[in-house]
Amino acid sequence: MNYFKDSAHLFRFFFLFVVAFVVFLVVRHFVVPKSFGEYGHYRGAAIAEIAARPARFAGHETCETCHADVLETKKAGKHANVNCGACHGPLANHAADPSIQPAKLDTAVLCIRCHAASAAKPKGFPQVDAGQHSGGLACETCHQPHSPAIQTGDTK
Amino acid sequence: MNGVEGYIYPNEVTLIWSVLIVLYPYITGLVAGAFILASLVRIFNVQAVAPTYRLALLTALSFLIVAPLPLQLHLGHPERSPEMYFTPHSTSAMAMFGFVYLWYLMAVLVFEIWLDYRRDIVLLSQSSTGWKRLLYRAMTLGSYNISERSLAIDHKVGWFVTLVGIPSAFILHGYVGFIFGSIKANPWWNSPMMPVVFIFSAMVSGIAAVMLLYMLTAKWRGLAIDMPCVDTIAMYLFYTFIIDFSLEMLDLIHRIYEADESFRSLNFMVHTKLYFSQIVLQIFVGTLTPIILLGITQVTKLPAIARRRIYVVAGCLVQIGIFAMRWNVVIGGQLFSKSFLGFTTYKMGLVTREGLLVAIALTILPLIILWVLLKLLPLGPEKKHGLIHAVPASTI
Amino acid sequence: MNIDRRHFLVMLPAAAIAWKYVLAGTPEASPNYAMTDHWWSMLIDIPKCIGCGNCVRACAAENDVPNGHFRTWVERYHVTDWDMTNPEVISPDGGKEGFPAVQEDAGKYFFVPKLCNHCADSPCTQVCPVGATFITPDGVVLVDQTYCLGCGYCVQACPYGCRYIHPEKKVADKCTLCYHRITKGLTTACCESCPTGARQLADLKDPNDPIHAFLKTHHVQVLKPQMATGAKVFYNELDGAVR
């Protein structure tokens, strides 16, 4: 018993640990998010939160529901697999509210991005030196972007 | 582009781990090293260094208190750091930090200091007045038993705490080495030797720091410096340094010999961007020079005053060298691109949250805390055994 | 445009499902989407990439990617001869505005789009101390930005350099494989805007996905296979010089 009396202070120190541990467990119970561990070591609700972000590009299927005529033209030409958003940019806001007009595109900037000639580009890809090719004329003078092949009698 | 040479991945331009992340392993290294010195007395019975026992423990505590601060200042969301306690990811070495830190702080350092100082605390709680009296009374945890028996029990328990403290200190600092060493994406860090090199360089810096602080505090207290004590410390410092240097040289030689895909890029980095911090500061100024100086004192018989001066110079150079080592690991590991085709530059801020001034302040802060601790927990009269209570040597 | 026809077409089930959830923005998951039915990946066809930078711009627009940081980027390689260990690589602003034209043709040039590889054994999720980054049951590596501490360990652990710390939010950020789009039947913004089909989203669990036939008939690689990350972005005709 004497031994116990002389080591009582150690039990007091140890008691601090026990109290801290209990407090820790209680706080943990309230603080850890409920969905944590649902699928793995992470907050399961985060998946749905990330998936709920609104899209900025509407996706070409959506454009095609209204602009089916453009789709018809495009399907037959070289730009068949170029999606609407590739040139027109993100237009989910226009699809949601068609009164929102998309910005007019500048072919001088747009077409050049893909078709400016460079030895670095794949050999089979259609590319031109803009100055030599059109002498400064805008691309749409001769090429309709939705069906870029020049047809005889095609002026716009 | 600003500060970029060659090709780096676009997201690699800005370093994300700053000088504060250099400071963190430096600080925990001092903690571990100081504690190892204290354990020399307690476990390995090197009585010659007993005068530094209490100082080593208080130094370790001062630095340990400051250790989380550079990490908190670095985090994008420090308010979320309790998540490491509530949902630690068992595959992440970094997740250990909270628990290892708390364990080492409470179950090792604070416990051991309390056990060694308990008699003084009880006496001070009775003799002091005002807020100090309240503080000491709180520190007694309500027990005023300082009978010979209870102190003997404290002594035995303290021995076990120190024993447990040695691997705890190795884990406290070694896990930082593992944090770097286990990253396969970074060839400058990726090495199984990283935790070992970290631990040995920590011991070097911690032992040197306590040696310097001992000489400083002895001077302030107007006491004569115990030469056998500092000579013994310097000897341990010297041999630990030889081991540390050998490990680092082994890593270097291994890298040069194997010359894997990263070698050309890393070699270029060491010769250009890291030339000053690695070749000049870490190797020549911070390692070779102190080793040579200490070696001189080990093989020749110099007068005490010359030895003291050499120890002070060597001790300071060691701090520079070990800090430079942490710098070269942390900053160096982010200067080269993982494409091995280019490099970026570290732009250290001055007054920003992770800038130079904050780093300097965090280095000085532990010394201020140590000063406060020394006022509250005095080292006591200079004795042959640093352990003050009247316990016969045979029971140790 | 014929208003009546437009309304009629909007009722079409295929379009309606995609569009209704595109407009959603509410936290309920798409009811037709079961995570365990999918295992997402991507196929990048190097010979088709022309370095136009559409993908980099589209990603930035879709995901509010901060300037100077990249969830995806394009690299241009120039390998002059037999020495593959010293390619000339550039990625001006991640390739966002394309690349400067090249006149002469010495050696070979090619473009390599890069993004998060959504690794099955990702080192980044391994090192996260709190579980803020993870791989979903459908194979997409995501960051829970309300839980992330911003410690940066995941950024250090990624061998591909695809992560960064968001300068304003101060948390880790990276490509999400447009998770908010692919769970609603859309493709990723980068694949949507790629004019040549060099980037294609793939669902490895879907037996009808064209990637299965492609993998059977082409030589594909992942980046840094020696890192054993289980990378799921497959590159057709990836050159040995690629880093």
Image (cartoon, coloured by chain):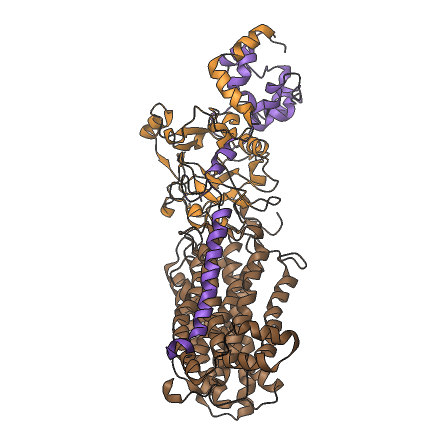
Residue C30 locus on image (x, y percent) = 47, 26
Q: Classify residue C206 as left or right of residue B318.
A: left
Residue nearer the viewer, B247 or C163? C163
Residue nearer the viewer, B191 or C185? C185
Residue nearer the viewer, B46 or C205? B46
Residue B225 locus on image (x, y percent) = 55, 89
Position of residue B381 relative to residue C48, above or below, is below
Which chain is displayed in orange in the rendered image? C
The answer to whether residue A38 is seen in the rendering is: yes
Q: Classify residue C144 as left or right of residue C234.
A: right
Position of residue C175 relative to residue B96, above or below, is above
Tally of numbered tags: 0
Residue C159 locus on image (x, y percent) = 44, 47
Which chain is displayed in brown in the rendered image? B
Residue nearer the viewer, B52 or C78? B52
Residue A118 locus on image (x, y percent) = 54, 31
Position of residue B97 relative to residue B162, above or below, is above
The residue depicted at 48 percent of the width and 63 percent of the height is: B102
Q: Please, which residue is most extreme toward the front here?
A: A1
Position of residue A19 relative to residue C131, above or below, is below
The answer to whether residue A82 is seen in the rendering is: no
Q: Please, which residue is most extreme toward the left here?
A: C216
Give the colour of chain A: purple
The quadrant of the image that shows the C terminus of chain B is: bottom left
